[in-house]
Image (cartoon, rainbow, N blue to C red):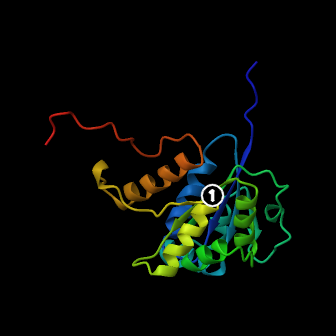
Amino acid sequence: MAEPVRTRRIIVAISGASGAVYGARLLQVLRGLPGIETHLVVSDAGWRNLQHELGMERPAAQALAHQVHDVNNVGAAIASGSFQCHAMVVAPCSMRTLAAIAHGLADNLLTRAADVMLKERRRLVLMVRETPLHLAHLRNMVAVTEMGGIVCPPLPAFYLRPQTVDDLVNHSVARVLDLIDVEHQLAPRWQGLEPNAP
């Protein structure tokens, strides 16, 4: 008799940086995988970007997650360290959200959930989106890294010869799935070049 698949909870947060497609695509992929339960929290600016960048209204985004939490409800389950959670991804992560996490502000459910991930020594991945970066941005990234978080900007990888924007998005989301230890077939893996390749 096969062992039952153990459910792993993953929090997906969408903040107000450009790049709402990363959070939406991550939710789509996770929704199709067995043994994954997703919890979604979106900032006010995140909802605006989902609509502006993707034409995605709230009901469509909410349907991608197993459970949706109001960003202002700091009493939600994901605000507690007793909530058993495998990982959290902020996709995208604005500089405001990065700063709040770096300084432990926990001023809404999104930043509180991230704070919980750090204090409980669980996997936290921030898909930070901004350019160019000034010194405060860089220092906040260092602070989060020193606390155990992973800063993972969604940078395009051209060595895989992407043909579409979807290819670029899928590659970045695939890298995040690797970081949170979720098996996937979303994007090809680098197989290396022949030794005599130019």
For the C terminus, the image quarter is: top left
At x 76% / y 67%, what residue is drawn? 69
The total of numbered circles placed on residues is: 1
At x 76% / y 30%, what residue is drawn? 4
Image-quadrant location for residue 157: bottom left
At x 63% / y 72%, what residue is drawn? 102
Q: Is residue 79 above or below residue 31?
A: below
- Locate residue 72, reporting x and y percent: 77, 78
Given residues 81 and 89, the one toward you in this image is: 81
Circle 1 residue:
148
Given residues 92 and 58, the one toward you in this image is: 92
Work out whether residue 190 can be spotted.
Answer: yes
- Locate residue 158, reporting x and y percent: 29, 55
Image-quadrant location for residue 80: bottom right
- Locate residue 20, reporting x and y percent: 53, 69
Q: Amino acid at mark 1?
A: Gly
Image-quadrant location for residue 92: bottom right
In terms of secondary structure, where does tag 1 sit?
loop
At x 57% / y 77%, what residue is drawn? 16
Given residues 197 and 121, the one toward you in this image is: 121
For the N terminus, the image quarter is: top right
Work out whether residue 90 can be spotted.
Answer: no
- Locate residue 3, reporting x and y percent: 75, 25
Q: Is residue 186 above or below residue 78?
A: above
Tell me if 78 is positioned left or right of 192 in this view: right
Q: Is residue 92 above or below residue 178?
A: below
Judge the density around disc 1: few (<14), some (14-19), many (≥20) Cα neighbours within 10 Å.
Answer: some
